Amino acid sequence: MCIALTSIPNYLSRSFIAFRNLASIYLQFSTPKRLPFSTMASLSSLKKHKVTVVGSGNWGSTMSKIVAENTAAYPNLFEPTVQMWVYEEEVTVSEKSRHYDPGSEFCRGPQKLSALVNGLHENIKYLPDITLPNNVVANPSVEDAVKDATILIFVIPHQFIGRICEQIRGKIIPHARGISCIKGVDVSDQGIQLFSESIGHKLGIYCGALSGANIASEIAREKYSETTVAYDPPPMDSRQPTPVGSPYSSQVDLSKAASKSGPRLHALPADYPPLTHENVKKLFHRPYFHVRMVSDVAGVSLGGALKNIVALAAGWVDGLGWGDNAKAAVMRVGILEEVKFGKIFFADSVRTSTFTEESCGVADMITSCMGGRNFRCAKLAVERGVSVFEVERTELNGQKLQGTSTAYEVNGFLKKQKLEKEFPLLTAVCDILEGKVKPEQIPDLIEPKD
């Protein structure tokens, strides 16, 4: 190659400029840039929450539908598949079912319920005619269903929660978090506990609560409803520079709380999305199912438990033909006794506003006393001249009332505390169930005594 001497300076100049540009481009793409902390945090959240619903009745199946829709909608937060534990039983597809086909393998005699749910994408026994999302997987093994789940949603009759917790203790990951949709209270010789507390103690995890004016069949058909989710993120889960607890934690005697409850919690690893109110809401909120987040786990749990007792009384007076005024009177007293119960036994954490302003309080009381399962069974019992237990046996397709068992448990606890006279409505319901008094006596029984 021969270059004229006069052109050498221009040649070198152009070569230097080209080299400089190439070097600039290289440095631009090879030198790591300092990303904002929020961006780095989001990139580090490589893992996703696995969700398991423990229970598959009408409410459990409805809850599985809701959360499966949301795990699919938020793939950056949740694994899409939702495991739903199914208590295995054999079910025959009815000729009235939309799935009935004599030539179908599912219609050849009794079939396992889990197989029907997975094959037909419908719980034909407990939530008929409602299509479940394809990412709901029915699992007859509760131990397998909860394996590796970081979020456990408990939706089973409260009579069975102790046995289920025994089965899965030691089978769940230590940093799992729970939400209890169980409406009742756990009464033992040691005292009274919320089921969110009971689950937390038995499994060594933190557990919040969900409750509200929620009739499962209406929600499953995507009719507008609202609910309350109580979740008070444990301080060790906080991603703030200084751990932050509940807005109401200043009102709690932490030394007493630790001695009374205190499972040693494991922090949620930083490579999972944080379970803030915002992210928990994303798991449950749907266009037809609106969620309000609070931190009052005790208030939300009690509202869901005690209203079932009150609903029995409302059903009895309605069955007697006494009308809406009588039901309103029962509901008024019921709300007052809910608030009193919370203030006496959970004074450190419960807030009156939870009962008066949230769906889990007055709204749930109204719904339960106008058309809930406990109300309907009590009404039918009066109209037919039989016991509530007989109606439960013949009308509920194997499901159990929560109001009757909760009434017995709460009344037994109040008697031990010598406080049954402080709660005349709760006491009257138990006495009617035991045949000591009649529904016609309710007005006199709940009248304040001077």
Image: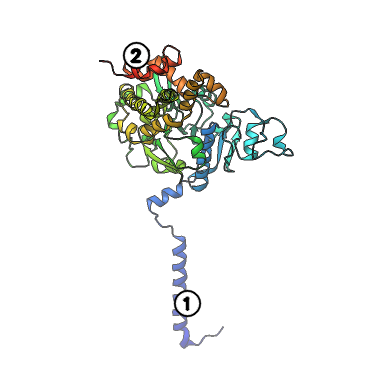
Q: Is residue 372 left or right of residue 328?
A: right
- Which of the labelled discs sits on residue 215, or is there none? none
Question: Residue 410: which quarter of the image?
Answer: top left
> Secondary structure under badge 1?
helix
Q: Is residue 335 above or below residue 274?
A: above
User: Residue at (45%, 35%) from the top-left corner?
Assistant: 214
Percent coordinates x, y for residue 290 in the rendering? 42, 42
- Image depth: mark 1 or mark 2 in front: 2
> Secondary structure under badge 2?
loop
- Toward the left, the furthest residue is 450
Colour pattern: rainbow
Marks 1/2: CA distance?
94 Å
Percent coordinates x, y for residue 287 in the rendering? 45, 46
- Note whether residue 271 is visible: no
Q: Is residue 351 left or right of residue 122?
A: left
User: Residue at (58%, 27%) from the top-left corner?
Assistant: 397
Q: Residues within 10 Å of mark 2 (few under 14, many from 20)?
A: few
Q: Is residue 185 above or below residue 97?
A: above
Percent coordinates x, y for residue 32 in the rendering? 43, 57
Amino acid type, label 2: Gln
Amino acid type, label 1: Ser
* The C terminus, quarter of image: top left
Q: Nearer the viewer, residue 130 or 132?
A: 130
- Note whether residue 380 is visible: yes
Which residue is tagged 1?
A: 15
Q: How many marks?
A: 2
Q: Residues within 10 Å of mark 1 (few under 14, many from 20)?
A: few
Which residue is tagged 2?
A: 417
Question: Residue 411: which quarter of the image?
Answer: top left
* The N terminus, quarter of image: bottom right
Q: Nearer the viewer, residue 92 or 56?
A: 92
Percent coordinates x, y for residue 435 in the rendering? 45, 12
